[in-house]
Image (cartoon, rainbow, N blue to C red):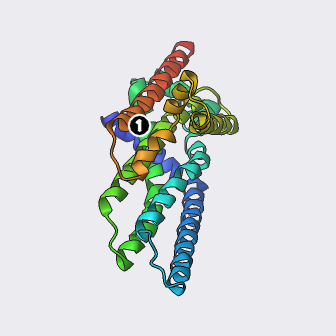
Amino acid sequence: MRNVWLIWRKEMRSYFVSPIAYILLLMCALIFGFFFWSLLQAYLQFSMEAQMRGEMFPMNMPEEITRRLFGNIPVTGLFIIPLITMRLFAEEKRTGTIELLTTSPIRDGEVILGKWLAATTMYCCLLFLSAINVAFLFFYSHPDWKPILVSYLGLLLQGAALLAIGTFISTLTKNQIIAGAATFGACLLIFVCGWVGEYNSETWARVLAYLSVSTHMESFTRGTLDSKDAIYYVTLIVVGLFLTARSMESLRWRS
Protein backbone atom coordinates (compact mmCIF):
# COMPACT_ATOMS: atom_id res chain seq x y z
CA MET A 1 0.00 0.00 0.00
CA ARG A 2 2.98 2.32 0.41
CA ASN A 3 3.51 2.41 -3.36
CA VAL A 4 -0.18 3.12 -3.91
CA TRP A 5 0.09 6.03 -1.48
CA LEU A 6 3.15 7.39 -3.30
CA ILE A 7 1.41 7.23 -6.69
CA TRP A 8 -1.71 8.84 -5.22
CA ARG A 9 0.29 11.67 -3.69
CA LYS A 10 2.19 12.24 -6.94
CA GLU A 11 -1.04 12.46 -8.93
CA MET A 12 -2.74 14.77 -6.44
CA ARG A 13 0.29 17.05 -6.53
CA SER A 14 0.18 17.11 -10.33
CA TYR A 15 -3.47 18.19 -10.21
CA PHE A 16 -2.88 21.09 -7.85
CA VAL A 17 0.45 22.36 -9.17
CA SER A 18 -1.26 22.97 -12.52
CA PRO A 19 -4.39 25.02 -13.26
CA ILE A 20 -6.42 21.83 -13.86
CA ALA A 21 -7.75 21.37 -10.33
CA TYR A 22 -8.50 25.04 -9.77
CA ILE A 23 -10.33 25.41 -13.08
CA LEU A 24 -12.41 22.30 -12.37
CA LEU A 25 -13.22 23.47 -8.84
CA LEU A 26 -14.23 26.92 -10.09
CA MET A 27 -16.35 25.49 -12.90
CA CYS A 28 -18.16 23.07 -10.60
CA ALA A 29 -18.69 25.70 -7.91
CA LEU A 30 -20.37 27.96 -10.47
CA ILE A 31 -22.40 25.17 -12.07
CA PHE A 32 -23.61 23.58 -8.83
CA GLY A 33 -24.34 27.01 -7.36
CA PHE A 34 -26.38 27.95 -10.41
CA PHE A 35 -28.31 24.67 -10.28
CA PHE A 36 -29.09 25.14 -6.58
CA TRP A 37 -30.06 28.81 -6.97
CA SER A 38 -32.30 28.09 -9.96
CA LEU A 39 -34.10 25.23 -8.24
CA LEU A 40 -34.54 27.23 -5.04
CA GLN A 41 -35.94 30.23 -6.93
CA ALA A 42 -38.32 28.03 -8.90
CA TYR A 43 -39.79 26.32 -5.83
CA LEU A 44 -40.04 29.60 -3.92
CA GLN A 45 -41.97 31.04 -6.84
CA PHE A 46 -44.29 28.04 -6.96
CA SER A 47 -44.83 28.29 -3.21
CA MET A 48 -45.69 32.00 -3.34
CA GLU A 49 -48.12 31.48 -6.22
CA ALA A 50 -49.82 28.65 -4.34
CA GLN A 51 -50.19 30.81 -1.21
CA MET A 52 -51.65 33.69 -3.24
CA ARG A 53 -54.29 31.29 -4.59
CA GLY A 54 -55.00 30.10 -1.07
CA GLU A 55 -53.61 26.65 -1.78
CA MET A 56 -51.12 24.57 0.13
CA PHE A 57 -47.83 23.88 -1.63
CA PRO A 58 -47.90 20.06 -1.76
CA MET A 59 -44.22 19.36 -2.34
CA ASN A 60 -41.48 18.77 0.19
CA MET A 61 -39.25 21.59 -1.02
CA PRO A 62 -35.87 20.43 0.42
CA GLU A 63 -36.44 16.90 -0.85
CA GLU A 64 -37.44 18.07 -4.34
CA ILE A 65 -34.49 20.46 -4.57
CA THR A 66 -31.93 17.84 -3.55
CA ARG A 67 -33.48 15.19 -5.81
CA ARG A 68 -33.33 17.44 -8.86
CA LEU A 69 -29.86 18.68 -7.94
CA PHE A 70 -28.56 15.12 -7.66
CA GLY A 71 -30.22 14.35 -10.98
CA ASN A 72 -28.22 17.11 -12.70
CA ILE A 73 -24.82 16.38 -11.14
CA PRO A 74 -24.20 13.17 -13.19
CA VAL A 75 -24.78 15.14 -16.40
CA THR A 76 -22.12 17.62 -15.29
CA GLY A 77 -19.86 14.68 -14.50
CA LEU A 78 -19.96 13.60 -18.14
CA PHE A 79 -17.95 16.72 -19.00
CA ILE A 80 -15.78 16.81 -15.86
CA ILE A 81 -14.65 13.16 -15.68
CA PRO A 82 -12.79 13.18 -19.05
CA LEU A 83 -10.86 16.24 -17.87
CA ILE A 84 -9.81 14.38 -14.73
CA THR A 85 -8.70 11.14 -16.39
CA MET A 86 -7.37 12.22 -19.78
CA ARG A 87 -3.86 12.90 -18.47
CA LEU A 88 -3.44 9.93 -16.10
CA PHE A 89 -1.51 7.71 -18.52
CA ALA A 90 -1.59 9.76 -21.73
CA GLU A 91 0.73 12.36 -20.20
CA GLU A 92 3.08 9.61 -19.01
CA LYS A 93 3.24 8.20 -22.55
CA ARG A 94 3.76 11.62 -24.10
CA THR A 95 6.66 12.53 -21.82
CA GLY A 96 8.18 9.03 -21.93
CA THR A 97 7.89 8.46 -18.18
CA ILE A 98 5.57 5.51 -18.83
CA GLU A 99 8.69 3.45 -19.53
CA LEU A 100 9.96 4.22 -16.04
CA LEU A 101 6.67 2.98 -14.58
CA THR A 102 6.58 -0.20 -16.63
CA THR A 103 10.19 -1.08 -15.83
CA SER A 104 10.12 -0.05 -12.17
CA PRO A 105 9.66 -2.53 -9.30
CA ILE A 106 6.23 -0.99 -8.62
CA ARG A 107 3.53 -3.41 -9.72
CA ASP A 108 1.03 -2.39 -12.39
CA GLY A 109 -1.85 -2.85 -9.99
CA GLU A 110 -0.33 -0.37 -7.54
CA VAL A 111 0.18 2.22 -10.27
CA ILE A 112 -3.36 1.79 -11.57
CA LEU A 113 -4.94 1.84 -8.13
CA GLY A 114 -2.96 4.91 -7.06
CA LYS A 115 -3.91 6.88 -10.18
CA TRP A 116 -7.56 5.84 -10.05
CA LEU A 117 -7.81 6.71 -6.35
CA ALA A 118 -6.30 10.12 -7.06
CA ALA A 119 -8.86 10.73 -9.80
CA THR A 120 -11.64 9.58 -7.47
CA THR A 121 -10.35 11.88 -4.73
CA MET A 122 -10.43 14.78 -7.16
CA TYR A 123 -14.01 13.89 -8.05
CA CYS A 124 -14.90 13.80 -4.33
CA CYS A 125 -13.55 17.33 -3.99
CA LEU A 126 -15.94 18.43 -6.73
CA LEU A 127 -18.87 16.67 -5.03
CA PHE A 128 -17.98 18.47 -1.82
CA LEU A 129 -18.76 21.78 -3.54
CA SER A 130 -22.34 20.63 -4.15
CA ALA A 131 -22.55 19.55 -0.50
CA ILE A 132 -21.87 23.15 0.52
CA ASN A 133 -25.03 24.21 -1.31
CA VAL A 134 -27.06 21.38 0.21
CA ALA A 135 -25.83 22.40 3.67
CA PHE A 136 -27.76 25.67 3.37
CA LEU A 137 -31.01 23.68 3.42
CA PHE A 138 -30.21 22.53 6.96
CA PHE A 139 -29.99 26.13 8.15
CA TYR A 140 -33.51 27.02 6.97
CA SER A 141 -35.32 23.65 7.06
CA HIS A 142 -35.02 20.14 8.38
CA PRO A 143 -34.47 17.77 5.43
CA ASP A 144 -33.95 14.08 6.00
CA TRP A 145 -30.18 13.54 5.87
CA LYS A 146 -30.31 9.80 5.17
CA PRO A 147 -31.60 10.05 1.54
CA ILE A 148 -29.01 12.76 0.93
CA LEU A 149 -26.19 10.47 2.07
CA VAL A 150 -27.56 7.65 -0.09
CA SER A 151 -27.65 10.00 -3.08
CA TYR A 152 -24.06 11.04 -2.52
CA LEU A 153 -23.05 7.38 -2.24
CA GLY A 154 -24.65 6.77 -5.63
CA LEU A 155 -22.90 9.79 -7.15
CA LEU A 156 -19.57 8.57 -5.78
CA LEU A 157 -20.05 5.02 -7.10
CA GLN A 158 -21.18 6.25 -10.51
CA GLY A 159 -18.28 8.70 -10.75
CA ALA A 160 -15.76 6.06 -9.65
CA ALA A 161 -17.08 3.66 -12.31
CA LEU A 162 -16.79 6.24 -15.09
CA LEU A 163 -13.36 7.24 -13.82
CA ALA A 164 -12.25 3.60 -14.11
CA ILE A 165 -13.36 3.63 -17.74
CA GLY A 166 -11.53 6.90 -18.34
CA THR A 167 -8.40 5.49 -16.71
CA PHE A 168 -8.44 2.57 -19.17
CA ILE A 169 -8.94 4.83 -22.18
CA SER A 170 -6.05 7.03 -21.05
CA THR A 171 -3.70 4.04 -21.45
CA LEU A 172 -4.59 3.68 -25.12
CA THR A 173 -3.12 6.95 -26.41
CA LYS A 174 -0.49 9.55 -25.63
CA ASN A 175 -2.69 12.42 -26.80
CA GLN A 176 -4.68 13.92 -23.93
CA ILE A 177 -7.29 15.47 -26.22
CA ILE A 178 -7.99 12.11 -27.86
CA ALA A 179 -8.15 10.44 -24.44
CA GLY A 180 -10.58 13.07 -23.16
CA ALA A 181 -12.79 12.95 -26.26
CA ALA A 182 -12.88 9.14 -26.26
CA THR A 183 -13.71 9.08 -22.54
CA PHE A 184 -16.51 11.59 -23.04
CA GLY A 185 -17.92 9.53 -25.91
CA ALA A 186 -17.75 6.27 -23.94
CA CYS A 187 -19.29 7.82 -20.82
CA LEU A 188 -22.04 9.49 -22.84
CA LEU A 189 -22.84 6.23 -24.63
CA ILE A 190 -23.08 4.22 -21.43
CA PHE A 191 -25.16 7.05 -19.93
CA VAL A 192 -27.81 7.30 -22.65
CA CYS A 193 -27.99 3.68 -23.84
CA GLY A 194 -30.77 3.04 -21.35
CA TRP A 195 -33.10 5.46 -23.13
CA VAL A 196 -34.11 2.75 -25.59
CA GLY A 197 -35.85 0.96 -22.72
CA GLU A 198 -38.40 3.79 -22.53
CA TYR A 199 -39.92 2.96 -25.92
CA ASN A 200 -38.82 -0.64 -26.56
CA SER A 201 -39.45 -3.68 -24.39
CA GLU A 202 -37.46 -6.25 -26.38
CA THR A 203 -34.67 -8.22 -24.72
CA TRP A 204 -31.81 -6.27 -26.31
CA ALA A 205 -33.40 -3.01 -25.18
CA ARG A 206 -33.74 -4.26 -21.61
CA VAL A 207 -30.09 -5.33 -21.65
CA LEU A 208 -29.00 -1.86 -22.82
CA ALA A 209 -31.21 -0.28 -20.16
CA TYR A 210 -29.55 -2.40 -17.50
CA LEU A 211 -26.07 -1.46 -18.74
CA SER A 212 -26.84 2.26 -18.50
CA VAL A 213 -25.25 4.03 -15.52
CA SER A 214 -28.17 6.48 -15.38
CA THR A 215 -30.68 3.65 -14.87
CA HIS A 216 -28.91 2.46 -11.72
CA MET A 217 -28.71 6.00 -10.34
CA GLU A 218 -32.50 6.40 -10.11
CA SER A 219 -32.86 4.45 -6.87
CA PHE A 220 -30.03 6.43 -5.23
CA THR A 221 -31.62 9.79 -6.12
CA ARG A 222 -34.83 8.57 -4.47
CA GLY A 223 -32.83 7.85 -1.32
CA THR A 224 -33.12 4.08 -1.71
CA LEU A 225 -30.04 1.90 -1.31
CA ASP A 226 -30.49 -1.03 -3.69
CA SER A 227 -27.75 -3.66 -3.53
CA LYS A 228 -28.07 -4.60 -7.21
CA ASP A 229 -27.31 -1.02 -8.26
CA ALA A 230 -24.30 -0.83 -5.94
CA ILE A 231 -23.04 -4.18 -7.26
CA TYR A 232 -23.41 -2.90 -10.83
CA TYR A 233 -21.18 0.11 -10.16
CA VAL A 234 -18.61 -1.96 -8.28
CA THR A 235 -18.56 -4.45 -11.17
CA LEU A 236 -18.03 -1.63 -13.66
CA ILE A 237 -15.13 -0.35 -11.55
CA VAL A 238 -13.53 -3.80 -11.47
CA VAL A 239 -13.97 -4.24 -15.24
CA GLY A 240 -12.47 -0.81 -15.97
CA LEU A 241 -9.45 -1.39 -13.75
CA PHE A 242 -9.01 -4.93 -15.12
CA LEU A 243 -8.90 -3.61 -18.69
CA THR A 244 -6.43 -0.97 -17.55
CA ALA A 245 -4.22 -3.69 -16.07
CA ARG A 246 -4.29 -5.66 -19.32
CA SER A 247 -3.39 -2.52 -21.28
CA MET A 248 -0.52 -1.79 -18.88
CA GLU A 249 0.68 -5.36 -19.22
CA SER A 250 0.90 -4.95 -22.99
CA LEU A 251 2.86 -1.72 -22.50
CA ARG A 252 5.27 -3.52 -20.18
CA TRP A 253 5.88 -6.25 -22.77
CA ARG A 254 6.49 -3.69 -25.52
CA SER A 255 8.93 -1.76 -23.36
Q: Give the camera-side residue of 112 and 70.
A: 70
**Residue occupied by mark 1:** 114
Is disc 1 surrounded by few (<14), some (14 to 19) or many (20+) residues within 10 Å?
A: many
Q: Residue furthest front?
A: 54
At x 55% / y 76%, what residue is drawn?
A: 46
Measured along the vertical axis of the image, is residue 37 above or below residue 74?
Answer: below
The amino acid at mark 1 is Gly
Image spot of residue 80 (x, y percent): 58, 49
Residue 177 visible here: yes
Q: Give the camera-side residue of 33 and 177.
A: 33
Q: Give the camera-side residue of 174 and 117.
A: 117
Which quadrant of the view contains residue 89?
Answer: top right
Measured along the vertical axis of the image, is residue 65 above or below residue 244?
Answer: below
Tell me the quarter of the image containing the C terminus.
top right
Q: In the image, is 104 to the left or to the right of 98?
A: left
User: Circle 1 — which element?
Assistant: helix
Q: In the image, is 34 to the left or to the right of 12?
A: right
